[in-house]
Image: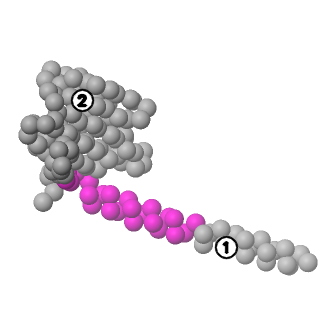
Amino acid sequence: MKRLNRLTMLAALGGLVLAAMPFGAAEAQWVFLARKAMGRIHQMTEGQQNGRPGYDFATVILDASADKVFSTALELARKNKSVRILMHDAHARRLQIAEGDRTATLNVVPFSDDVAQLLIAGHAGAGESSTASMVVHAVLRVCKEMHKHCEVSQ
């Protein structure tokens, strides 16, 4: 009986270890991929369709806490006299600004304690030119302010 309990306990512990292993391996792979993508700015544009305005997106992964990335972006927006802050939510790490009929929404997503993703979506009003270069330059300004090397991915 004592031997059966011992075998049962060992089997249960072995099962727990095996169940936890794939998550550790997957997390390690994710961290490896995030490090490879660090500082690369990716952008995407969705043109106007059927009278609906187009959107421009830019994103980058930074080796910094999400709170630090958000506070840096918010401070840059506050200092920029050509934009109006429409909304900011420090808890959700979300910020919306406007310049004329153009608007941009910024989100910061934490991946870990020291890795975050910055996403900016820009939207131009009717008759306005694309916001593509504006969202990319906004990402570059945050990178520069944080002393992070970032470059636009080809």
Q: Quadrant of residue 71?
A: top left
Is 129 on the left or on the right of 31, as rendered?
A: left
Q: Is residue 22 left or right of residue 145?
A: right
Where residue 5 sits in the image (x, y, percent)? Answer: 84, 74
In the image, what residue occupies the spot 38% across and 59% down?
A: 31
Query: Element under label 2?
Result: strand
Q: Position of residue 38 (x, y in %)?
A: 26, 54
Q: CA distance from mark 1 to mark 2?
A: 53 Å
Q: Nearer the viewer, residue 64 or 139?
A: 139
**Residue that badge 1 annotates:** 14
Residue 149: x and y in percent read: 18, 47
Give the residue type at disc 2.
Ile
Q: What's under tag 1, amino acid-wise?
A: Gly
Say what secondary structure mark 1 lies in. helix
Disc marking residue 97:
2
Q: Can residue 62 be seen in this snapshot? A: no
Measured as percent of width and height from the top left, residue 25 is found at: 47, 68
Residue 95, picture quadrant: top left
What residue appears at the point 11 percent right and 43 percent down from the top-left corner? 130
Q: What range is drawn magenta here?
A: 20-44
From the viewer's side, name the closer residue of 6 and 98.
98
**Any magenta on residue 50?**
no
**Which residue is pictured at 42% across the width and 48% down the height?**
112
Density class for disc 1 (Cα within 10 Å; few <14, some 14-19, many ≥20) is few
Q: Nearest to the eye among marks 1 and 2: give it.
A: 2
In the rendered structure, which disc, 1 or 2, sits on the residue that comes first in sequence?
1
The residue located at (30%, 57%) in the rendering is 35
Check the image and report above or below for 3 versus 45: below
